[in-house]
Amino acid sequence: MFRGSRLSVLIFAALAANGSAQTLSAPEAPSVAEARALMAGGKAAEAMRELDALAVVRPEPAGVERLRGILHYENNQLPEAEASFATAVQQDPSDLQSLQMQGIVLFRMGKPAQAIPILEKAHSSGPIANADPNYVLALCYIDTKRYDDARRAFAEQYDFRPDSAAAWLVTGRMLFRQELTGPAAAAAKEAIQLDPRLPLAHRLLGEIDLANGDVSSAVVELEKEQALNPLDGETYDRLGDAWLRSGQYARAQQVLDRAVLLEPNATGPYILLGKALLEQQDPVMATMYLEHALKMDPSNSMTHMLLGRAFAASGRREDAQREFEALRRLQDSNGIAPSKQ
């Protein structure tokens, strides 16, 4: 499993460019530089053939296993990539890039405990070019429930003091991203205890409460955030969601109006506002917001569903049918069971 979209996709040409080519004594053998050039030109299969030929040369030229590992990684051949990077490190313990990539691949293979010592060693040896080792290492710590170590890793990434409120808050947000709501809430509360006026901490608690279905607690936390941070559009968006779930549609509309002004490029507030207006029997106004959301993101199934309802409530049956058909196509393409309209 490979969670955390924040982790950069490896650009093999950039990694390969940092390696030095080594000329072979046998003139007929292709050079590492030639293989690297093929990779940079998008000719991965040809590059792998060149590298496979070089792999049987003794001694094996420097950089061959690292480049083979990169190609395996790009093809999502993770066991093969890990083996190549491990061989590269065995051949050259100073090959920092291969060491870093070995740890990242182990993490992607769902082996965080094995990745930790490798990433710790890589981290202590120097910086990485294309993926932040602190982030990957912190995710490994989270997977192994070493939350304090994760906090220290995140803190170093953001230049926070490890015991600061900001370090606790960023850790709480990362824990919440991994759906660990209990540890995330504990981290957010620690952040608030250290700095009661820290922006975004109460919002995180509100989001956790929403995820846990505790709407009343979510409202309390989000209103605290609103008081501390009155120009944060996402807070109004979450608060609008909370009021919608509690059936307070007029209140939801009020805060969502603020959300769309502060976050004009986000679709969420427009969709929620359309839903709030539908619940208040105002399909015409709901249609206006939902059509705007649809222009911003035509692939959002919720927008099609709500817009279909709005058209149906306005007597626009053909438009409603068009939206419901678009919804069914999206559900079919995503393998989702048809929703009730």
Image (cartoon, rainbow, N blue to C red):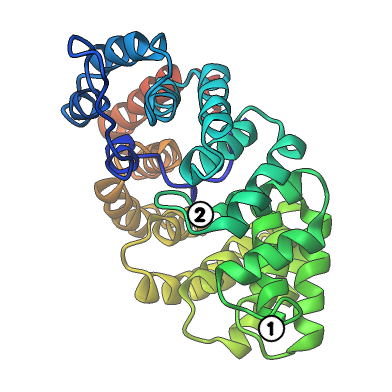
Residue 205 left/right relative to 53: right
* Crowdedness near tag 2: few (<14), some (14–19) or many (≥20) residues, C-alpha within 10 Å: some
State the mark number for residue 132: 2
Rendered location of residue 283, percent (x, y): 39, 52
> Residue drawn 39% across and 39% down?
10
- Give the mark nearer the N terminus: 2 vs 1: 2
State the mark number for residue 224: 1
Amino acid type of the residue tagged 2 in the rendering = Asp
Judge by depth and name the residue closer to the eye, 217 or 84. Answer: 84
Rendered location of residue 225, percent (x, y): 64, 81
Determine the secondary structure under disc 2.
loop
Residue 136 left/right relative to 265: right
Q: Are marks 2 and 1 in contact (CB under 8 Å)?
A: no
> Residue drawn 16% across and 28% down?
41
Amino acid type of the residue tagged 1 in the rendering = Lys
Rendered location of residue 224, percent (x, y): 69, 83
Rendered location of residue 5, percent (x, y): 49, 45
Residue 213 shows in this picture? no
The CA span between labels 2 and 1 is 34 Å
Up/down of 80 relative to 300, above or below? above
Quadrant in the rendering for residue 150: bottom right
> Residue drawn 27% across and 42% down?
17
Quadrant where the N terminus lies?
A: top right
